[in-house]
Image (cartoon, rainbow, N blue to C red):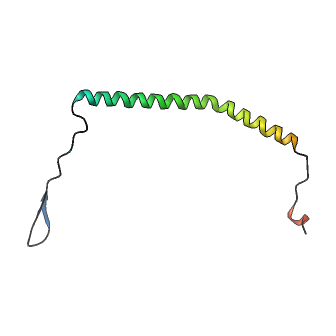
Amino acid sequence: MLVIDAANGLVVSHTPAPRKRMFEDLETAAQAMREQEERKESIFRQSVEAEKNKEDLFEKRFAEALRKAKDLPDTKPIREFDLD
């Protein structure tokens, strides 16, 4: 609610709207916090597993790139002034 001075058109005072409660009681708030902690722990476990598998993934990519490099013939790279 705003209280405005009619003569000046300035805001004299205001009262903010009442805040809505996020949870009805302490038990539902505690339950929500437990669920949030479980989600955090799950995300952390997934990131740890991804880090463990990252090394294997990089080794596979390197082996594939090495195999492709061996299959390609060795050619001299073309330089710009060779094209003239």
- Say if 82 sits above or below 56 in the image: below
Q: Position of residue 4 (x, y in %)?
A: 11, 65
Residue 33 left/right relative to 59? left
Residue 80 left/right relative to 10? right
Q: Position of residue 65 (x, y in %)?
A: 78, 40
Q: Position of residue 74 (x, y in %)?
A: 91, 47
- Name which residue lies at 33% across and 30% down: 33
Residue 80 left/right relative to 27? right
- Say if 76 sits above or below 8 in the image: above
- Residue 51 is drawn in which quadrant? top right
- Name which residue lies at 82% across and 41% down: 68
Residue found farthest to the bottom: 7
- Name which residue lies at 24% across and 35% down: 23
Which image quarter is the C terminus in?
A: bottom right
Q: Position of residue 54 (x, y in %)?
A: 64, 33
- Name which residue lies at 21% across and 30% down: 25
Which image quarter is the N terminus in?
A: bottom left
> How many labels were placed on the picture?
0
Q: Nearer the viewer, residue 39 or 55?
A: 39
Residue 8 left/right relative to 43? left
